[in-house]
Image: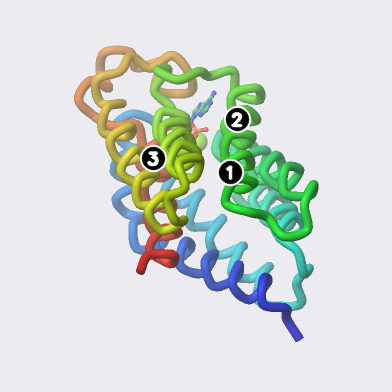
């Protein structure tokens, strides 16, 4: 039988993959405006693969569960997002591996390590108009809230707000990485689809922890 951690993890992942499926068409439209239009399909494939991978027997601890997420996403998500999400989950897994029962502080460190992994693999920094413009502010908000003793539900709610603001702000940024950089000024006024996707899955995750 599944342990409580694996069951909880699967439940949260299920909420995330549901949100991705609900928002697939919107993500497609967003990526059509500034890229090649495959982001909705790619992330939905990732969501379906996660549901499948997590339907059966599962490892018992968070680090191993995140490792399975990484492997699943690396295989199932095409385009640029696949390897970036895979490294994000892998780096988070490596942080959580250091402890048996990860605290909110460990999760904050894991989220920060995910941002660093994405940045190292893709060469993007904050302000380059990528998913990092949602994920870095979210990680900072989460870490800050956890550091000041806020409950996880509050820290996650602040992370979602930061991700949404960060994603919205990409509409005014000049693209320097990925496909959008070929379009230059033509993307002005449209938000970055990868950043919007971060806000979507993070909101679904936070909802599972809200009171
Ligand atoms: P593509 O179809 O261009 O290969 P996807 O559609 O899978 O890529 O993902 C597009 C999103 O990936 C962008 O909206 C952006 O948020 C993100 N992205 C692209 N390049 C990078 C990068 N170098 N670093 C971080 N994120 C990136
Ligand atoms: Mg694309
Ligand atoms: Mg593509």
Q: Is residue 18 above or below residue 39?
A: below
Mark 2 or mark 1: name the one nearer the start of the chain. Answer: 1
Mark 2 or mark 3: name the one nearer the start of the chain. Answer: 3
Residue at the farthest left position: 189
Label number found at residue 33? none
Badge 2 local density, few (<14 within 10 Å), some, or many (20+)?
Answer: many
Choose mark 2 or mark 3, whichever is in front.
Answer: 2
Residue 196: image quadrant is: top left
Are the two marked residues, 2 and 1, in contact with CB atoms closer than 8 angstroms? no
Image point (59%, 18%), residue name: 123
Are the two marked residues, 2 and 3, in contact with CB atoms closer than 8 angstroms? no
Task: Locate residue 175, reporting x and y percent.
Answer: 38, 17
Label number found at residue 118? 2
Does ligand 3 reach within 8 Å of label 1's beta carbon? yes
Are the two marked residues, 1 and 3, in contact with CB atoms closer than 8 angstroms? no
Does ligand 2 reach within 8 Å of label 3's beta carbon? yes
Q: Which residue is mark 3?
A: 37
Mark 1 or mark 3: name the one nearer the start of the chain. Answer: 3
């Amino acid at each position: 039988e599944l342990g409580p951690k694996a069951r909880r993890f699967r439940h949260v992942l299920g909420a995330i993959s549901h949100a991705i499926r609900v928002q697939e068409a919107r993500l497609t439209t967003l990526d059509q405006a500034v890229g090649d239009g495959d982001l909705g399909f790619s992330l939905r494939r990732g969501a379906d693969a996660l549901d499948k991978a997590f339907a059966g027997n599962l490892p018992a601890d968070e680090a191993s569960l995140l490792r399975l997420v990484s492997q699943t996403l690396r295989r199932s998500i095409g385009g640029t997002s696949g390897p970036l999400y895979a490294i994000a989950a892998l780096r988070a897994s490596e942080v959580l591996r250091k402890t048996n029962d990860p605290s909110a502080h460990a999760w904050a460190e894991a989220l920060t390590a995910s941002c660093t992994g994405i940045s190292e693999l893709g060469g993007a920094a904050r302000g380059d108009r990528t998913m990092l413009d949602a994920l870095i502010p979210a990680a900072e908000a989460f870490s800050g809230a956890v550091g000041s003793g806020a409950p996880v539900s509050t820290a996650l709610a602040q992370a979602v707000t930061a991700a949404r603001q960060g994603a919205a702000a990409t509409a005014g940024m000049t693209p320097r990485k990925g496909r959008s950089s070929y379009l230059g000024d033509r993307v002005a006024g449209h938000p970055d689809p990868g950043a919007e996707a971060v806000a979507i899955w993070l909101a679904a995750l936070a909802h599972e922890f809200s009171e």
